[in-house]
Image (cartoon, rainbow, N blue to C red):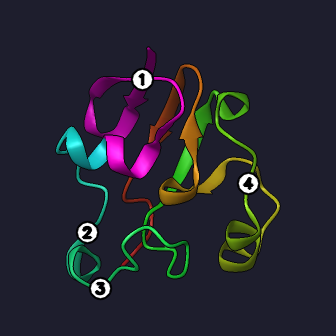
Amino acid sequence: MAKVTIQNEGHCIEVPNNSNLKEALIAAKMPLYNGPRKLLNCRGHGRCGSCEILVISGAEHLTPRTAAEHRILKTYDPHRRLACQAAVNGDAEIEVNTLAL
C-alpha cells in the first residue's frame, strides 16, 4: 500500500500500488475538481486538464508522464501532473485544486 498525502486538504489516504490517482482521490472523497470542473471534465481520458495536481514529493513513485499530459500541461515540469494519467507506486505528497477558476 502507498500513502498519498493531500497537503492542502490535510488528509492522507492509503491506496494499493498501481492505483489510478484520480480514482483513488474520488473514492476517498477528496475534492479533486472545483467549481464547474465537477461537471465539465473528460472523465479521466486526459483531454481537459481539470484534474491537474502539484506533486510536492514522491514524483518518482508515480508512473511516467503520458503523451496526453505533455500535450495538455504544455510543460515538462515533473511536479505538474494529471491525476487521471498517474498511477501510484509508492508514497507521494500532492496538492489538489491548484488551478484557478
Q: Is residue 2 left or right of residue 66?
A: left
Give the residue type that dot 3 points to: Leu
The residue located at (31%, 23%) in the rendering is: 12
Q: Sequence order check: which comes first, mark 3 or mark 4?
A: 3
Give the foreground label among 2 and 4.
4
Q: Is residue 90 magenta?
A: no
Report the disc number at residue 34. 2
- Structural distance between the alpha carbons of marks 3 and 2: 10 Å
User: Where is residue 69, by image quadrant?
Assistant: bottom right
- Tell me the element at label 4: loop
Quarter in which the C terminus is drawn:
bottom left
Q: Which residues are magenta?
A: 1-24
Question: Which residue position is annotated with label 1?
Answer: 16
Instruction: Work out which residue is located at the far left of the displayed protein and give it.
Output: 29
- Structural distance between the alpha carbons of marks 1 and 3: 28 Å
Question: Which residue position is annotated with label 3?
Answer: 40
Q: Is residue 55 left or right of residue 52?
A: right
**Residue 45: x, y in percent?**
50, 73
User: Where is residue 77, by image quadrant?
Assistant: bottom right
Give the residue type that dot 1 points to: Pro
Give the foreground label among 2 and 1.
1
Give the residue type that dot 2 points to: Asn
Q: 14 or 93: which is nearer to us?
A: 14
Q: How many marks?
A: 4
- Tell me the element at label 2: loop
